[in-house]
Image (cartoon, grey):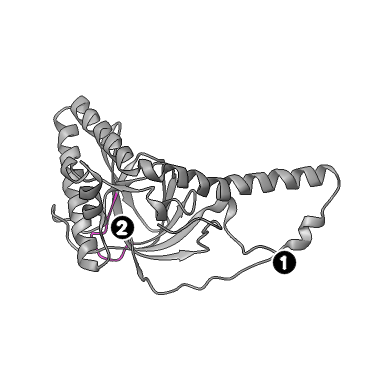
Amino acid sequence: MPHPLRMPAATLITRLKVYDSVAPDGQRGGTPHMHFLCTEMYFVLNGSGAVEIIDHNGFARVDLLPHAALVFSAGTIHRLINPHGDLEILVIMQNSGLPERGDNVVCFAPEHLQDDAAFAAAMRAQTPAEAVQRRDRGVEGFLRLKALFAANIEEGRAALHAFYAAAHARTAHLHAQWREVVAAGAQAEVQATLARLDALAAADTSYLAQAQHQLTHAAPYQTLGFCGHLNRYLDYVPEGVVQG
């Protein structure tokens, strides 16, 4: 019997309705955060807004219009801005299974990253009120980094790399599990493709008999994410890997 379908290379596909509550700087939107291992794409389904970014080059703001697509790589601190309250996005992300297991660290100020207990408390978001509180703490850390870059780019870079180091320390216990997820997901998909190429080289097309299809309907936005309310499509959970 064919295996359940998943996206190529175990890619994560998520529909996102961006938060429209007001952050400490007066802007509406999501939680500034970054990923260690995932390149990501935002495709605008509805509405308009922006993404604010901090990376090694400093702060940038990218406008998002209907049907625009923005791609950014691991290490990019990103924050969705939803000024009109109507921004909906299709998120296409590398390595399904990793974001659900801690491959995403909010841009907290140093006091929330100093140890595991402080980090766990700051990351807690089991209710809408806690999600807003987490977002606001992330925005405060983001604004701190933005101000440091504006004052002096080298000072900003030093603070950014200090954030990376603290984020690494807070997630070090997860790295072995991340490797399992990638091996069972993206790596397994690549190996399956190479096996099919070997089959084609031997004039064996028998694997094509396993062709299948699957329709996923849009569901209500239920999950509290970093940037808004989430509805995942074909979310891949590797067998034997426990949800974090």
Callout 2 crowding tier (Cα within 10 Å): few <14, some 14–19, many ≥20: many
Residue at x 36% of width, y 40% of height? 172
Occupied quadrant, residue 76 = top left
Sequence-wise, the earlier of marks 1 and 2 is: 1
Residue at x 61% of width, y 69% of height? 214
Residue numbers of the magenta segment: 79-87
Occupied quadrant, residue 30 = bottom left
Q: Is residue 163 above or below residue 105?
A: above
Callout 1 crowding tier (Cα within 10 Å): few <14, some 14–19, many ≥20: few
Amino acid, disc 1:
Met
Amino acid, disc 2:
Cys
Q: In this rendered view, identify the residue nearer to me: 62 or 2.
A: 2
Q: Is residue 98 above or below residue 128?
A: above
238 displayed left or right of 229: right
Residue at x 68% of width, y 48% of height? 192
Q: Nearer the viewer, mark 1 or mark 2?
A: 1
Q: Residue 150 placed where, x, y %?
A: 16, 33
170 displayed left or right of 202: left
Which residue position holds label 2? 227
Residue at x 46% of width, y 46% of height? 178
Find out whether residue 171 is within the magenta segment: no
Q: Residue 138 placed where, x, y %?
A: 21, 50
Q: In this rendered view, identify the residue nearer to me: 124 or 64.
A: 124
Magenta stretch mostly in which secondary structure?
loop
Occupied quadrant, residue 161 = top left
Q: Is residue 40 above or below residue 48?
A: above
| Count of all numbered marks drawn on residues in the image | 2
Q: Residue 107 placed where, x, y %?
A: 25, 45
